[in-house]
Image: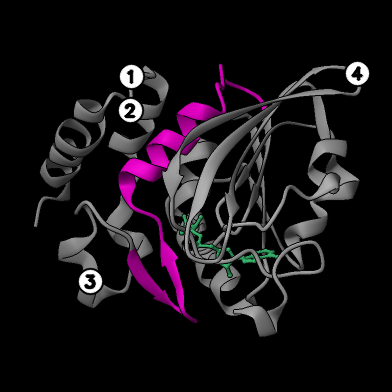
Amino acid sequence: MDFSISRRRMVEQHIKSRGVRDPQVLDAMLQVPRHLFVEEALRDQAYSDFPLPIGHRQTISQPYMVAVMTEALRLKGGEKVLEIGTGSGYQAAVLSRIAGRVYTVERIAELARRARRVLDQIGCTNVNIKVTDGTFGWEEEQPFDGILVTAGAPSIPQSYLRQLAPGGRLVIPVGSLGSQTLMRVTHASPGRFDEERLLDCRFVPLIGRNGWQNEDY
Ligand code: SAM
């Protein structure tokens, strides 16, 4: 099967047509072979307009959501970006086509291992993965020009604000377990963080010390 045709259709029908315009984002979505980030039995659905299961009750996000979140970071190219929730590794791969370096954190070791394999297979050499509770960010590597959280948080962890470079953007779904609002927080000036509400969304929970507790879920 020629997946490049499916990929082009995905970008035209599900992403461009809904208003994503950033050429770097569209280009990255055209390049990254999404079908490699899902199990073989689901490959023919990899470019469809919905999330897919990746095991451990987790999902690879809907392509449109990956595009919107990446665009919301307002990357120009070459930045240092932190992702929370590596999952399949697909979002990290998209980010790695635009950013200079991507740091991504996953709490489930098996998912991180699988993501590493696929990222290596497609030559994403600028992605670092760590297995830990990502609600603390990645202290040793801060500050970040962009932080992207791909799991829903009950509130914004302070560690993310502390690790955001001046001018940096944090994109994070915040709300209840059942529904969230995608927020962008910009580090506008020292100690000042401007918040914007972007859209309604529904993510699996951000589980950790500064997120949901395992027993809430
Ligand atoms: N970005 C992923 C992709 O492209 O496939 C999709 C991520 S999935 C919607 C959310 C991920 O966040 C899951 O893999 C989950 O295990 C992870 N997660 C949840 N809480 C976390 C935490 N505290 N630290 C790190 N990862 C976490």
Q: Residue furthest bottom?
A: 215
Q: Quadrant of the C terminus?
A: bottom right
Q: CA distance from mark 3 to mark 4?
A: 46 Å
Q: Is residue 165 visible?
A: yes
Query: For mark 4, what is the residue?
Result: 190
Q: CA distance from mark 2 to mark 1?
A: 7 Å
Q: Earlier in the sequence, mark 2 or mark 1?
A: 1
187 w.r.t. 63: above or below: above
Query: For mark 1, what is the residue?
Result: 21
211 w.r.t. 77: above or below: below
Type of amino acid under label 3: Leu
Q: Is residue 123 visible?
A: no
- Mark nearest the camera among 2 and 4 is 4
Q: Toward the viewer: 23 or 49?
A: 49
Q: Earlier in the sequence, mark 3 or mark 2?
A: 2
Determine crowd level at label 2: few under 14, some 14-19, many 20+ residues with C-alpha closer than 10 A: many
Q: Toward the viewer: 121 or 158?
A: 158
Residue 29, given in percent of the width and then of the height, sits at: 33, 37
Q: CA distance from mark 1 to mark 3?
A: 28 Å
Q: Cβ–Cβ below 8 Å for labels 3 and 2?
A: no
Query: For mark 2, what is the residue?
Result: 26
76 vs 38, left or right, is right
Q: Cβ–Cβ below 8 Å for labels 1 and 3?
A: no
